Amino acid sequence: MLPALRIEYCGEWHELRAGEVLTIGRVADLVIDDNPELDPLLLEIFDENGMWWIASTAATRTIQVSDPSGRVSRELAPGTRAPLVFHPAHVVFAAGPTTYEFALHGDLHYSAAATSAELRPDRVELPRLTAAQRLLLVVLCERALRRPSRGHGDFPTSAEAAARLGWSLTAFNRKLDNVCDRLDRAGVAGLRGGRGNLATRRRVRLIEFALAARLVTHEDLGLLPERAITHG
């Protein structure tokens, strides 16, 4: 029999046994939040053919599923599904200005390299970040990193983040473009500018990936100034 899967969210644990289906969302078995921008039914987790699967029932939003290191990740688009092959799997998504994360733990005896290209997770070789680029990611993720027990955190506007660092808005946006361009070239989806990719959505996607891939952690909060500094 397939071992039970354990879901951890905000310090609470939920167990899912073979033959059961767990729904996740705003009106679901596992209620993430009452955020009106969150889908009533966002995800389903179930077993099939001796494996645990995660399926998106979201209307529009994309969900990130990554391994513990964040080096291997899968983009789960609406209406798609993927086998749970990570140990554990970290699930990250955004609803409005809020980013959420939960973890899936289980005795998963499957390789991330599936037999079908459709099931093979995207592999991303992360570029080395400069000090300024890391600082930009830290300030964008600061609220989420300071509230790990809640499992999610809202994010600042570009103007708020620039003021927090003492940078001009022009300098901040230039550095933001550079970080997004580098990660886009590395294979991270959703960071390319232009029509159809609003600035707010691109910023949310960057935060989602930075948290899921552990590009910044709580320890990096020490890089932030106690008060705004002057910097071009």
Image: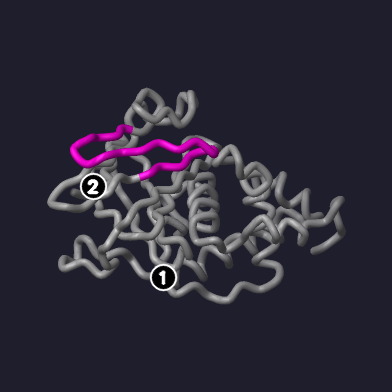
In front of the other: 13 or 100: 13
**Is 19 covered by the magenta stretch?**
yes
- Which of 177 and 130 lies nearest the eye of the viewer? 130
Residue at the disc numbered 2: 80
Q: Residue at x 30, y 45 (%)?
A: 4
Q: Nearer the viewer, residue 171 or 45?
A: 45
Query: For the point 60% across and 40% down, which residue is it?
Result: 149
Residue at point 70% right, 46% down?
159
In-image side of 77 versus 206 (left or right): left
SS at badge 1 = loop
Q: Residues within 10 Å of mark 1 (few under 14, many from 20)?
A: some
Question: Which region shows up in magenta?
Answer: 6-23
Tell me which residue sits at (39%, 59%) in the image. Answer: 87
Q: Is residue 134 covered in magenta? A: no
The circle on residue 124 is 1
Q: Are marks 2 and 1 in contact (CB under 8 Å)?
A: no
For badge 1, the amino acid type reads: Val
Give the percent coordinates (x, y) of residue 39. Answer: 37, 30
